[in-house]
Image (cartoon, rainbow, N blue to C red):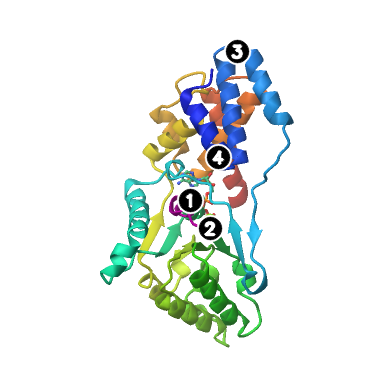
Amino acid sequence: MATIEQVKALMRMHFEDNDERFRTIALQIAAHEAKIGHAASAREIKDLVLSSKQTARRKVIKYSGKYDMIEQRPADAAMSDLILSENLEDRIKRIVTEYRKKELLRKNGLKNRSKIMLTGAPGTGKTMTASVLANELGLPLNVIQIEKLVTKYMGETSVKLRQVFDCIEEIQGVYLFDEFDAIGSDRSLDNDVGEMRRILNSFLQFLENDDSYSVIIAATNNPQILDKALFRRFDDVLDYAIPDEQQIQRIMIAKLDGLVAEDIFKKQMYQYMVGLSHADIVRACEEAVKYSLIYEEKITRKLLQICIQDRKSLYQFREA
Ligand SMILES: Nc1ncnc2c1ncn2[C@@H]1O[C@H](COP(=O)(O)OP(=O)(O)OP(=O)(O)O)[C@@H](O)[C@H]1O
Ligand SMILES: [Mg+2]
């Protein structure tokens, strides 16, 4: 039998229309059934999931007309899925709390923190944080397509940037400038026509003048090339780092609890993963879950180590 937690998770995903998570949880239940010796029900659940049509694909809505450089992405990540240091978690919660009290703050001449910069290593949860915030605040997640914003035509980028800020004012949401370094880079690195300098200046101006109810997030894994003038225009700068052993443990438990053949939640295993990003560890765990489902085997230390080694070797290949 599925645990009550699994049933609740299934229900949540059904009501949130999150097809992908629904399927993952159903497969986890199948794995759990197999583990406790209910091979027939495990197979039945697996067959149901695998034969069901991949309906309700995650929908991306494109704004049309003057806002066509913005797209609305599904914001389905829950706060509890995001594994970070206590300090970062507290600061994210503070954004949520202040947003919920924004009217009270405004009445007293104050503004909730709503302009946030996220910096740090790839795969550590920056984009996911934007999704979590949108989800928590019940706002659409609007992602600015930087490549559509920054064009080679003089002046066009500034016009588009103004339109983005018009949209921020008009349609309340969480706005994510992902790969922000494309517009936020150091003005001294500029070309001779000074186009980037002007764009960055207008960005700073728009940001300063923004008085909307939206939340503006800029994310980059290249903070060293960002103009120093930028940082003080944001209400907070959150610096993301690769996970420590404690966070690794939390990811492993979230992904693998109940699916393992032996106690793999050990310091030695966490140490083996130190140096990898959250995204890599999530991927390695998911690969192990897939293998265990396909071959109907529980997850062993050895299997997980192979999956981790696979992720590690991707980097060796890239660095070679
Ligand atoms: N802190 C985290 N907690 C839980 N899962 C995470 C975390 N960070 C990353 N992941 C997993 O990795 C995936 C990719 O992470 P995300 O896109 O947020 O990384 P990023 O920091 O934006 O990377 P990049 O700098 O390359 O854009 C997420 O969808 C999630 O599955
Ligand atoms: Mg990202």
Secondary structure beneath disc 3? loop
Extreme-top residue of the structure: 37
Q: Which mark is residue 39?
A: none
Residue type, numbered disc 1: Asn
Tell me the residue that label 2 is attached to.
Answer: 141
Front: mark 3 or 2: 2
Label 3 and label 4: CA atoms lie apart by 28 Å
Give the residues drawn in magenta, as a range.
Answer: 133-141
Q: Residue at x 56, y 62 (%)?
A: 143
Front: mark 2 or 4: 4
Q: Which mark is residue 38?
A: 3
Extreme-bottom residue of the structure: 193
Circle nearer the N terminus (3, 4): 4
Label 1 and label 4: CA atoms lie apart by 14 Å
Circle nearer the N terminus (2, 1): 1
Q: Quadrant of residue 80?
A: top left
Tell me the residue that label 4 is attached to.
Answer: 15
